[in-house]
Image: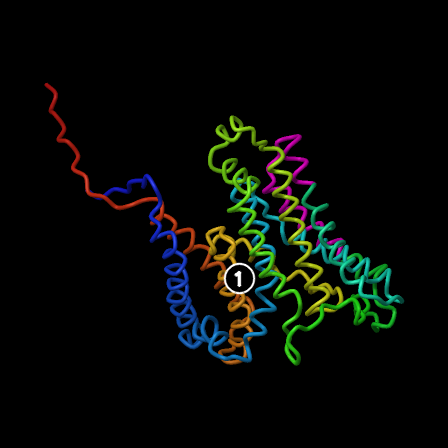
C-alpha cells in the first residue's frame, strides 16, 4: 500500500523546485477561480504574473515594491532560522516610519545632508524598540513572540491613526489626516533619472549581500543555525538561545523599521492612514518562498512585487477587485506550505504483514 515516509535528508532538487511548483499551482488555480467568478481568468493570471516582467516600463515599479519586501523578509528569515517567529513585522514597519517621520517633522525648517540618515537611524531604532517588547516577554516570561508581535501590530496602526489625525496633522492639508509632505532633504534621492527607482532599491540588495555573508561566513550566523536546528547542541556549544532571540528579533525589527521609513521617505513622502499596506505580512511569504536564503529572498521579493504591480494592471484590464492581490498571495502561501510535504516526505510502497489468526 502507499504511505508517506519522512526523508532522512530533504531533497535538494525538491527544495528549489517546490517554490516554482507553488507558483505554477497558484497561477492555474487562480485562472480557474476567477473564470468561475465570471472574469477572464487567463488574462488575470497573465496580468498578475507576466505583464510586470514583459513590459520594461513596469520594472521600476517592481523595484519600488520589492525593496521593502526584501528588507523585511531578510530580517524575518534570520529569526525564522533560529525558530524565533516574528509575525509582527508590519507593526515594526509602521513604528519605524513613525519614528523617522518624527525626525522629519522636527527638522522641517532645517536643511542638510544629515537629515535623511538621521531619519533612517530613527526608523531602525523605532522598529527595534517595537520588536524588543516580544523579545523581553519571550526571554523573561516565556510568552510566545508569535502572539505578542502580532498583537502589537494593531497597536502600531492605532498610534499611526492618532498621530496623523491629531498632533501631526498637516495644518495646510485641508483637514485631511496626513502629515506635512517631506522636504527635498527628507526624501530618498532618485538613482535613475526620470524613474521611480530610489536609493532604497540598491540598498536592499546591499543588505541582502551583507545578510548572506553574516549567515554563511560568520560565527554569529552559525550560532543562529545551530540554535534553530539543535537547541541542545547549541547549549552544549555555548550558544545562548536567549541572546539569539534578542539579536534576531532586534535585527528583524530594525530592518522592518528601515523599510518603513524608506517607504515614507520614498513613494509616500509623508504619513497617511493608508501607509499600512501589508508589507510586513507579505514579507513572511517572501521569506519562505526564498527558502530563508538571502538570494532566494531577493527573487521572492520580485515575484511578490509582481502581484502588487500586476494587481493594479488587472484592476484596469479585467476589472478585478483590489482584494484579488491578497487572494493570489494567500494561494501562493498555501501551495508553498503544501509542496513542502514533497521536500520532507516521499511516497513509498509497503506490504503489511498478514495478520495471524488467533485460536
Position of residue 348 in the picture relative to residue 50 (left or right):
left
Q: Quadrant of the C terminus?
A: top left
* Residue bearing mark 1: 301
Crowding at dot 1, Cα within 10 Å, few <14 / some 14-19 / many 20+, comes out as many
Instruction: Return the residue nearer the eye: 46 or 315.
Output: 46
Tag 1's secondary structure? helix
Q: Is residue 159 magenta?
A: yes
Residue found 36% across the figure and 57% down from its top = 17
Residue stretch rendered in magenta on the structure? 133-160
Q: Position of residue 149 (x, y in %)?
A: 64, 45
**Farthest residue toward the front?**
217
Q: Position of residue 348 (x, y in %)?
A: 23, 43
Residue found 34% across the figure and 42% down from its top = 9
Q: Position of residue 344 (x, y in %)?
A: 35, 44
Look at the image and name its color scheme. rainbow
Instruction: Return the residue nearer the eye: 208 or 2.
Output: 208
Residue found 41% across the figure and 73% down from its top = 41
Amino acid at each position: 500500500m502507499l504511505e508517506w515516509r519522512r526523508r532522512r535528508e530533504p531533497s535538494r532538487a525538491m527544495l528549489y523546485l517546490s517554490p516554482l511548483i507553488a507558483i505554477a499551482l497558484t497561477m492555474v488555480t487562480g485562472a480557474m477561480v476567477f473564470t468561475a467568478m465570471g472574469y477572464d481568468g487567463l488574462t488575470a493570471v497573465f496580468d498578475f504574473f507576466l505583464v510586470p516582467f514583459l513590459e520594461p516600463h513596469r520594472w521600476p515599479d517592481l523595484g519600488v515594491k520589492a525593496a521593502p519586501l526584501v528588507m523585511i523578509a531578510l530580517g524575518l528569515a534570520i529569526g525564522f532560522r533560529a525558530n524565533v517567529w516574528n509575525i509582527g513585522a508590519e507593526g515594526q514597519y509602521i513604528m519605524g516610519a513613525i519614528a523617522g517621520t518624527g525626525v522629519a517633522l522636527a527638522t522641517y525648517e532645517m536643511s542638510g545632508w544629515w537629515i535623511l540618515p538621521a531619519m533612517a537611524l530613527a526608523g531602525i531604532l523605532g522598529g527595534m524598540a517595537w520588536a524588543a517588547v516580544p523579545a523581553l516577554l519571550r526571554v523573561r516570561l516565556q510568552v510566545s513572540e508569535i502572539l505578542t508581535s502580532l498583537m502589537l501590530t494593531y497597536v502600531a496602526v492605532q498610534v499611526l491613526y492618532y498621530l496623523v489625525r491629531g498632533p501631526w496633522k498637516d495644518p495646510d492639508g485641508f483637514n485631511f489626516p496626513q502629515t506635512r509632505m517631506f522636504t527635498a532633504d527628507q526624501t530618498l534621492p532618485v538613482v535613475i533619472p526620470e524613474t521611480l527607482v530610489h536609493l532604497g532599491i540598491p540598498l536592499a540588495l546591499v543588505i541582502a549581500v551583507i545578510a548572506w555573508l553574516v549567515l554563511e561566513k560568520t560565527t554569529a550566523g552559525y550560532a543562529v543555525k545551530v540554535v534553530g536546528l539543535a537547541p541542545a547542541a547549541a547549549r552544549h556549544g555555548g550558544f545562548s538561545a536567549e541572546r539569539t532571540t534578542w539579536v534576531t528579533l532586534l535585527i528583524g525589527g530594525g530592518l522592518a523599521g528601515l523599510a518603513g521609513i524608506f517607504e515614507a521617505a520614498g513613494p509616500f513622502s509623508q504619513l497617511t492612514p493608508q501607509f499600512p499596506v501589508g508589507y510586513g505580512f507579505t514579507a513572511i511569504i517572501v521569506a519562505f518562498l526564498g527558502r530563508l536564503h538571502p538570494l532566494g529572498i531577493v527573487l521572492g521579493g520580485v515575484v511578490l512585487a509582481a502581484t502588487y504591480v500586476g494587481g493594479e494592471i488587472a484592476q484596469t484590464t479585467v476589472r478585478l477587485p483590489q482584494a484579488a492581490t491578497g487572494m493570489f498571495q494567500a494561494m501562493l502561501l498555501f501551495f508553498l506550505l503544501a509542496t513542502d510535504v514533497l521536500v520532507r516526505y516521499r511516497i513509498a510502497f509497503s506490504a503489511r504483514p498478514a495478520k495471524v489468526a488467533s485460536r
